[in-house]
Image (tube, rainbow, N blue to C red):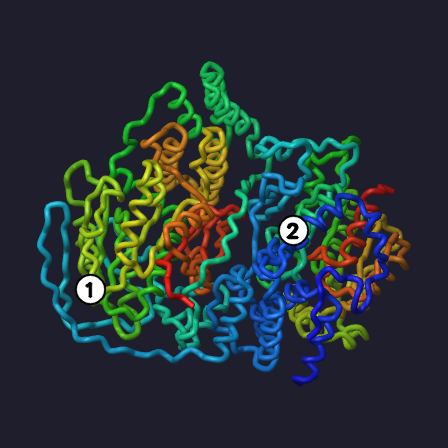
Amino acid sequence: MAASNEVNLNESKMVVPLNTWVLISNFKLAYNLLRRPDGTFDRHLAEFLDRKVPANTKPVLGVFSFDVIIDRSTSLLSRIYRSADGEQPQLNIADLEKPVTAEVVPVIIFFHGGSFAHSSANSAIYDTLCRRLVAICKVVVVSVNYRRAPENRYPCAYDDGWAALNWVNSSSWLQSKDSKVHIYLAGDSSGGNIVHHVALRAVESGIEVLGNILLNPMFGGQERTESEKRLDGKYFVTIQDRDWYWRAFLPEGEDRDHPACNPFGPKGNFLEGIKFPKSLVVVASLDLIQDRQLAYVKGLEKAGQKVKLLYLEQATIGFYLLPNNNHFYTVMDEISNFVGSDC
Amino acid sequence: MNKRNRRDISGGAGNGGIRKSDFQSMSSGKAKIWEEEQDAGGGGGVDELLAVLGYKVKCSEMNDVADKLEQLEMVMGAAPNLLCDTVHYNPSDLSGWLQSMLSELNNPPNTLNYRMLQSHHIDDPLHVRAESSSVTTNPQQQQFETTQSARIYDDDSEYDLRAIPGSAAYPQTQDGELNRKRLKTSGGSNSAPPLLPSSSPIVGVAAAGTVSEPTRSIVLVDSHETGVQLVHTLMACAEAVQQDNLKLADALVKRVELLAASQAGAMGKVATYFAEALARRIYKIYPQDCLDASSSDILQMHFYETCPYLKFAHFTANQAILEAFATASKVHVIDFGLKQGMQWPALIQALALRPGGPPAFRLTGIGPPQADNMDALQQVGWKLAQLAEAIGVEFQFRGFVANSLADIDPSMVDVRPDEAVAVNSVFELHPMLARPGAIDKVLSSIKSMKPKIFTIVEQEANHNGPFFVERFNEALHYYSSLFDSLEGSGLVPPTQDLLMSEVYLGEQICNVVASDGADRVERHETLTQWRARMGMAGFEPVHLGSNAFRQASMLLALFAGGNGYRVEENNGCLMLGWHTRPLIATSAWQLIVSDSP
């Protein structure tokens, strides 16, 4: 056993820079401390260990942020990131929701990852990622602090995403010159999963979402796929931990073919004939759930939906957390193009 | 071991198909971010990319950190439950955090050592001096409680001794998490008071001093409610005041009052207080010593009841004090602002429940002169003495009246060589910043008391900047969050406690906005600022850990009405805030140990 562990550790170390390896291994270790075999979660320790950063109305590298409580009853908070136009050293409260000035301003509603259980909108890794998104892709980002499992199971995260979508859609200061808010949904891991389901609700209620961006989205299914078996435990992630998170998120008694987990599976719905947003799906070749992610892409294609697959060779989970690899820039470029071409 | 140069992203196992030339074609924006985030420092520097994510790792120790991660991985794989009772400290110091876990795995904590204390000794009643008074109890046989439940003492005074459960008193929680902990009897975080595992690094080394740029953090309620116009007008008024355009300021403040009257909720109330304070400044009606000490104490009591900030302050400071006292047989707490003594019943209870028995406990309480000459300090001392006697803790009290902490002469405090000393300050340090030299004098006095630990709780805000408008704006955001949290407690109709709490905060607002010079005592500064000051004064941090965090979080769930309260860990300190905005910070300090390794 020890021998194969060693092999696993060395393999993952060879494909990512050392500081990336340290970062993701640190999370892996911490998360192991938090998940209990009985399905409960050490939330207090999780919050203690999570590195958080405050919002900051003083622009840093041209980006400022502030928090808004979207729904008091659920304490739903979102962090807004904007470009500071001009050289104002600090923005006043009246400036925060000043109308956007460009002709077209893409607004990305971002759902952070964490397998539905970890992280927050104010986690340092996600605050940093959102800032980079604004700086590179020239967008406004609304990062949603959705409720997490296991305390809040399906469909809480989707409900919160939906509330955020409505809030963004009705915020006049986010409208482009055509008096409409140009909305994109984006998310990594569980956030990617939320993107799909919120987009579905949007279609059903007639709110226009211009595009979905899914970064290593979290999908699953009852059956073990080939990539799961092949990559189990090799690149930071195990089948066992994936199972734990689904058990924590899905309604009690449901299996992984529940449509939340497996949207195009045996209990899922195909999306033929509906006006689903175009999708950009990023899949890392060393992510053990890639078969599920690729199946998702196929499902969209079969339903005649517009989807672009970005398959990244030798990429692991979390590659986008540090800008020290090609994949990071590839993805940022693709996102820029995706939101830049409003078609 | 495969050492990888971070910059070499095209080597090794493939590069995703991007050619080097592609970098040149990237927009300047991307290249700029790449450069600015690359680590400039070589071996001595900290990895910049990880630093931004909250982890301080020196480049030179990256490999070592990786090794530690691998070692822990091996162990955890083989025996996943080994670390479930560990107390964690300062996760930003990744190397330290990993090392402490490794150490714990190599040296498992001792099971409890029950030390039998010496038989009780009787203190001679101290000579009563003109400006101080003391109270002594002579407990009979040493009796200490072994039950795990809280004792509730009937007391017809204003005390609520149940207010903070001692660390022994664990109420039922909704989730099963606590029940699981209760089953363990080792000296982890669930037995009270916690004994330190032998290898636990309770004494943290001073974090690599990165004084970060000040941030301004804002939590807005949805803009429909914010009354943006109201805020805008307030700020414009403050600008006018700073520019001495009093005619304009006058017009604006009247406009604010109008708008505030029709603004529902916390924003309307905050605006009213700020408007009133601005009016005082404009018309030069400077408040006298706003309130006498006893009225101020009463207001603080209401604040104590309404919201968890003070409870959190007391709780976290007590936690640090308890851990510092460990197994000391004589302890002495010097409280810089005794007030109603609300912090101490819980500590006394926790000491009573200490395995091995309680220490002899001396409390020195400092307070301002009282208007009506009643010895308020003495009264508080008596109440505490009664409690201590009832639960079998040997107790002595001495009270000191002082106009300012800077007037305290350390020799007056009678620190004895054989006792463990804790100095405690809850919101008492920032007023020292109103007079030049005062804070240095106070810190110097504290040093000469040779405390084992010095606990500080302060408001997490910078209300002490040199420019009026800047202070005004900071305070507006700070108190908006604070009032919003009071609102969140959902007390409808508002109780007297709630209303008085608002008055309590209103007094602070008045002081920040309308006063100046020596009168302006609400000179709050941030944790970052206090850290710098403490470092320069010769103190180093003592870290608060995951056990204190956990208990504080659980306490919040019990007592707080709104669910917006959040505890946050910050480089070994704990902060309590409303949603994402930290509002108060607890830190603990000790004298820099000159011969540390």
* Disc 1 crowd, CA 10 A, few/some/many (<14, 14-19, 20+): few
Q: CA distance from mark 2 to mark 1?
A: 54 Å
> From the image, which quarter does the N terminus of chain B lie in?
bottom right
- Number of the label disc, if any, that sits on residue A128: 2
- Judge whether A230 appears above or below A301 on screen: below
| Residue occupying the point 58% across, 61% down | B57
> From the image, which quarter does the C terminus of chain B lie in?
bottom left
**How many numbered circles are shown?**
2
Amino acid beneath label 2 = Thr
| Residue occupying the point 52% across, 78% down | B82
* Residue A107 in the figure: left or right of residue B108: right
- Number of the label disc, if any, that sits on residue B398: none
Q: Position of residue A303 (x, y in %)?
A: 89, 57
- Judge whether A252 appears above or below B114 on screen: above
Q: Position of residue B112 (x, y in %)?
A: 35, 78
Amino acid beneath label 1 = Ala
- Judge whether A226 appears above or below A322 on screen: below
For label 2, the SS is helix
- Which corner quadrant of the image does residue A97 belong to? top right
- Judge whether B409 appears above or below B278 on screen: below
| Residue occupying the point 26% across, 46% down | B339
Depth check: give the residue in front, A326 or B11: B11
Tag 1 residue: B390
Whether marks 2 and 1 lie on the same chain = no
For label 1, the SS is helix
**Subunit of mark 2?**
A
* Residue B451 in the figure: left or right of residue B281: left
